[in-house]
Structures are given as structure tokens and as C-alpha cells.
Image (tube, helix red, strand yellow):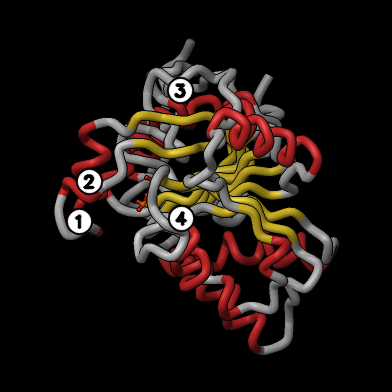
Amino acid sequence: MWKLTIIKSCLIINRVKLTIRFNLLENLLVNNGGNMRFFLAKDTKEVNTIAYNLIRAEILRNPKIVLGLATGSTPLGLYKLMIEDCKRGNVSYKDVKTINLDEYIGLPDNHPQSYHTFMYENLFKDIDIDLKNTKIPNGNAKDLAKECADYTAYIDKYTPDIQLLGIGSNGHIAFNEPGTSFDATTHVVDLKESTIKDNSRFFDSIDDVPKQAITMGIADIMKAKMIILLATGTSKTDAVYNAVLGPISEDCPASALQLHNNVVVVADPNASFMVRTKGVNPQ
Ligand code: PGA
């Protein structure tokens, strides 16, 4: 049994596939006991405010929250909101712990393109967090296997209350590319040629792009109590569709999220286009 209910800007999807066309930009909720809330944001700005309101409410409820963070262009607007509100004195990160998804192997932490630098420059330096409470994989560890095992152990000890995710246009989450086992914990990945090429825009030359990274595996990501996936732009529309309404398959790493019991997807009109217009095939 299922019912269609209307609420503001939110659509809940679960694994029971329904034949529905999502033509409205907002005000849709499909509720069949679903496990995924899908916010159809009006624009990128609203993606950031919806995500921030969720995170802010959790931090105010639990000032000692463990926050899983992501790099990439998608969360930048959200990080600006976190900074502004912290500077206004509304939210404090004094007791918050953070843990990041991934880091390149072989870049010094202070390299302009390391994720250590990204997080410091785009968030940590402007909020009142204690840097000792921030955790990012050490891509320069002598024993990378040990670093990965220790990272997974850290996640087991300080399991994120919220894990923030972006999504790649091929459905990757963190550096988990299509074909990655859903059972993988934190591991070393050889970056695909396409990823090296995509990321080369940030480096002087393609030869400077690291060839490997450490990434939380999907099994580690799935441990988070709540997952918020942000998606903006037309290049993400197929990936978002496959993630939330496609088959659960290693071909689309983000489709693993359909197996999690508390996922929020926030997408702008470009990224949600396929979900809204193609709808779902009955199964
Ligand atoms: P982006 O990357 O936020 O820069 O689009 C997302 C990702 O590849 O996970």
C-alpha cells in the first residue's frame, strides 16, 4: 500500500518502485514508508539552506556531533553558511568532531590541492573548531594499509551523526568509482583516467595530479546515522536518478544509499531534472 501526500519541498522515495511522474518543482512527498527524503530545491542557494538547516538543527540538539564532511565544489555554499552563522555566534563547533571522506596520496598536507588545505581554507579556519577534532586521511602515511584500517576503526568509534556527500556524474561517492564493492571499508584507490583528467584543472599539469587516493569505502559511509547528499547542475542529473530510483548496483556507487535508513538528497532543478521528468518504472 502506498499513498501520495503533499508537503513542502520534499519527496520521500523508497525501494518499492512506483509509476509516478514528478512534474512539480516542489511540494511532493511520496510516502510508502520510504527511507529517503528528496528535497527539490528551487535553486542552488536553497540546496545550501536546506542542508544547513538540517545540520544546524542537529548541532544545536547535540553540540558534540560528529560531522562527516566532503570536498569538491558542491558543499562550498553550505560551508559559507556554516561560517556566517558561526561568526554571528549562533552555532559553535567547539565540541564538534569532523571526519572527511578522502585525501590524495602523496600530496603534502599543505599543498594547495590537498583536501587538508581545502578544508582548512574553506571551513576550518573560519569556524571555532579545534583542529585536533578534525580528521582527514593521511595520504602520506608510510603504512597506507594501517592508515586505512585505523581510519575505519576511527569511524567505528566516532561514527558520523551526519555524513555529507557530493556525487560524481558517474554516480561515484567519495573516490568510490563504479564497480567498487559496497562492502569496502576505507581503502586505497587507483584514480581512473577520467577522474585524473577531471581533476587536472586544479593542477599545473595532468602529470601533477596524484594517481591514488585514500577513500572511505561505501561500507564506512553507510555507517553514518544520517546521510545528506547534495547535487547541483545538469551534469549530475543521470547520477541522481540512478542513485535514488535506479537499480541498487555497484555500477552506481551512490545507489547503495537506497539501502540506508536515513538519507536526505537535496538537489537543484538541474540535478533533479531526470527524477522529476522520467519518474519511476513499476517493478
Ligand atoms: P563536485 O564533486 O562537488 O566538485 O561536483 C563531487 C564529487 O565528485 O563527489
Residue that mark 3 sits on: 19
**How far is mark 2 from mark 3, CA to CA?**
36 Å
Q: Are marks 2 and 3 in contact (CB under 8 Å)?
A: no
Helix, strand or loop for disc 3: loop
**N-terminal of the two: label 3 or label 1?**
3
Residue that mark 2 sits on: 198
Q: Nearer the viewer, residue 235 or 180?
A: 180
**How far is mark 4 from mark 1, CA to CA?**
15 Å
- The residue depicted at 60 percent of the width and 26 percent of the height is 185
Q: Are marks 2 and 1 in contact (CB under 8 Å)?
A: yes
Task: Residue 18 in the image: state x and y as whole percent.
Answer: 51, 22
* Quadrant of the rendered image containing residue 77: bottom left
User: Residue at the left extreme?
Assistant: 205
Residue that mark 4 sits on: 71
Task: Using residue 239 as the reference point, say whether residue 162 is left or right of it.
Answer: right
**N-terminal of the two: label 4 or label 1?**
4
Task: Using residue 155 as the reference point, say whether residue 194 is left or right of it.
Answer: left
**How far is mark 3 from mark 4, CA to CA?**
35 Å
Residue that mark 1 sits on: 201
- The residue depicted at 53 percent of the width and 42 percent of the height is 141
Q: Amino acid at mark 1?
A: Arg
